[in-house]
Amino acid sequence: MRLTAAVLDAPHARGLAHFSLRLLPGWGVWRDEESPDWVHIRPPGGGTGLSFQTEPDYRPPVWPSGPDRPRMMVHLDLEVDDLERETTRAVAAGARPAAHRPREDVRVLLDPAGHPFCLYTESQ
């Protein structure tokens, strides 16, 4: 058994896949089934990737969560060398900053479908 990808639901799979390709330099489409409802992307050289599927009834999670609100089930952590530069680049690619910041060396952003993801640097 081998983990090949984590799958994220979205209102438009292709749109979220293209955002992720802008966010993750060097990644490419791994398996394109020529469907607007399913896309797989992978890092250079292979390895575990991300997949995106269209979910017509998709509701974005709320960060931070609260009672009777859609909760985040999973999020991506992306280590970066320059937190401010990569935050700016992610926003230019289509992300938006979340209001909640858990630590000074972490930036929580929301992708175009509303999934939270974190950019972080290793603490010195």
Image: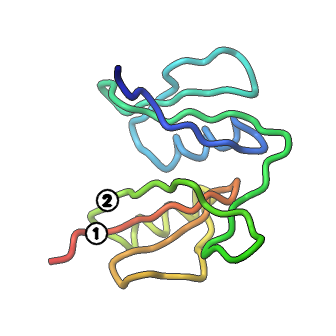
Q: Please, what secondary structure does the residue beneath circle 2 have?
A: strand
Residue 29 rendering spot, x and y as whole percentages: 52, 25
Q: Residue at x 37, y 33 (%)?
A: 43
The amino acid beneath tag 1 is Thr
Sort mark 1 into few (<14), some (14-19) or many (20+) by Cα contacts within 10 Å. some
Residue 83 rendering spot, x and y as whole percentages: 36, 71
Residue furthest right as drawn: 57
For residue 121, which numbered disc appears in the image? 1
Residue furthest top as drawn: 33
First-in-chain label (2 vs 1): 2
Sort mark 2 into few (<14), some (14-19) or many (20+) by Cα contacts within 10 Å. some
Question: Residue 34 falls in which quadrant of the image?
Answer: top right
Residue under label 2: 79
Determine whether, in the image, residue 49 is placed left or right of residue 11: left
Query: From the viewer's perspective, is residue 71 above or below residue 7?
Result: below
Residue furthest left as drawn: 124
Q: Please, what secondary structure does the residue beneath circle 1 have?
A: loop
Figure quadrant of the C terminus: bottom left
Figure quadrant of the N terminus: top left
